[in-house]
Amino acid sequence: MSHEQVKEDRAPLDGASANRRAFLRGVGVCLGLPSFESLLARGLAASEPPRAPMRTAFVYVPNGVHQRNWWPKEPGSSFALSETLRPLEAVKGKIQILGGLDHKNATAGPDGPGDHARASGSFLTGVRVKKTAGADIHAGVSVDQVAAQHIGHFTRFPSLELTCDSVRKSGNCDSGYSCAYQYNLAWRGPTSPLAPEPNPRLLFERLFGAGAPSERAATLALRGERERSILDFVAADAQALERSLGGRDRRKLDEYLTGVRDIERRIARAETEKDVPNPDVQTPAGIPAGYQDHIQLMYDMMLLAFQTDSTRIATFLVASEGSNRAFPEIGVAEGHHNLSHHMGRREMMDKIAQIDLFYLRQFARFLEKAAAVKDLDGRSLLDNSMIVYGSGNADGNAHTHHNLPVILAGGGGGALKPGRFIKHPAQPMTNLYLSMLDRMGAGSIPRLGDSTGRLADV
């Protein structure tokens, strides 16, 4: 879109309603904008060994797990993988099974029903989300976005958000809780969830441009020109609208424009970058028909983004909390959520265990591929990563949120001690996140959500 086309498309700002329509039109276009090519690390002295970046991802699966099949019997480095965790055998020495981590802010308390919304809403924030199905949602800043604020400027994308589920930011999804809590893991601010991308084709094109490899540089440049025009359009409408807003709405507008300014800065960086990654792979056709294929393709997109240093931070909401998806791929015709309320029925628990195993197989495939990628320093990409896999529910039948099922994969660039099952003393899961932020180079963050300190011995 050219500047001339933008000018022709704009509505006259001759009243509050016209301003609002014009502004909302701009918002609708701008919310899905991609980021751009960053300046990769350069200028190392000839005698200095190459430094590999730290990659961090948070993978979420819904409805808890079948506890009996999840936990290994004995802690330590000689632990035997449990039935559910057996797919991880090939990477056993590169994972930690972490016990003792809680999310107390996901428990009912005075809020009553709504455990699924609280489970996912608190998973990366550690806060008690506000019970509302309206526009006044309130969570907290998620750990991935805390990291992005400190190290996101090193890459084209400060962070990436992925999903294999729907994208929703409004509506009532769980006993009076907004759908925003269940369909978004990443929160830029307490009222600003970052919608994940479910379409691997659109994700790939945001990363590298559209079309065949020979066409991508041109399409990426054209996208940059178009988005600069859109940002000019949005900024002008926002400035005109601001005069008619009250104090609370002005704060919301300022929060939105913070994101716009962040996009502008990334565009400016992109214009100075010449070496745009152009992987020699075909653009995905779109969302696969099969769920397993969809999950695997999204994992592949995340791995490709890490390999090309397009981002170092990602969240992957495999399925929204409370998901009632059936699994014909493994012969499970009933919905996941319905099965999770098994009331001790053996046949239902067995099917939950099958679903847990299905999800672990996809995760294990991703880890094995990451372990096979040689990084700049000679280690594997997995060795230079920290990948959290878990759920905000522990036991889906009882809706418990203590001793959550959590895996920490990767070596953290040598800063982690994988190959263990550890029963930590009961503590907030956010303590793990503070320890991870330290290793990511995010500075000394004093607190995140309900944290009480750093998780020792990771």
Image (cartoon, helix red, strand yellow):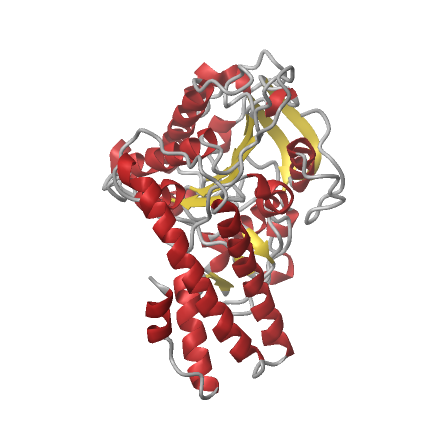
Quarter occupied by residue 441: top right
Q: What x and y, as percent, mark residue 207?
A: 40, 42
Return the residue nearer the eye: 440 or 299. 440
Quarter occupied by residue 339: top left
Can residue 335 be seen by looking at this rendering? no
Q: Is residue 379 left or right of residue 446?
A: left
Can residue 49 be seen by looking at this rendering? yes
| Residue drawn where x is 46% and y is 63% of the image | 231
Q: What x and y, as percent, mark residue 6?
A: 36, 69
The mark total stands at: 0
Return the residue nearer the eye: 406 or 336. 406
Q: What x and y, as percent, mark residue 288?
A: 25, 41
| Residue drawn where x is 62% and y is 42% of the image | 147
Residue with the most extreme top position: 78
Return the residue nearer the eye: 352 or 369. 369
Q: Establish if 209 lies above or below 246.
A: above
Return the residue nearer the eye: 215 or 317. 215
- The quadrant the N terminus occupies is bottom left
Residue with the most extreme bottom position: 15
- The quadrant the C terminus occupies is top right
Q: What x and y, as percent, mark residue 26?
A: 42, 68
Q: Establish if 411 lies above or below 209.
A: above
Q: Establish if 132 lies above or below 12.
A: above
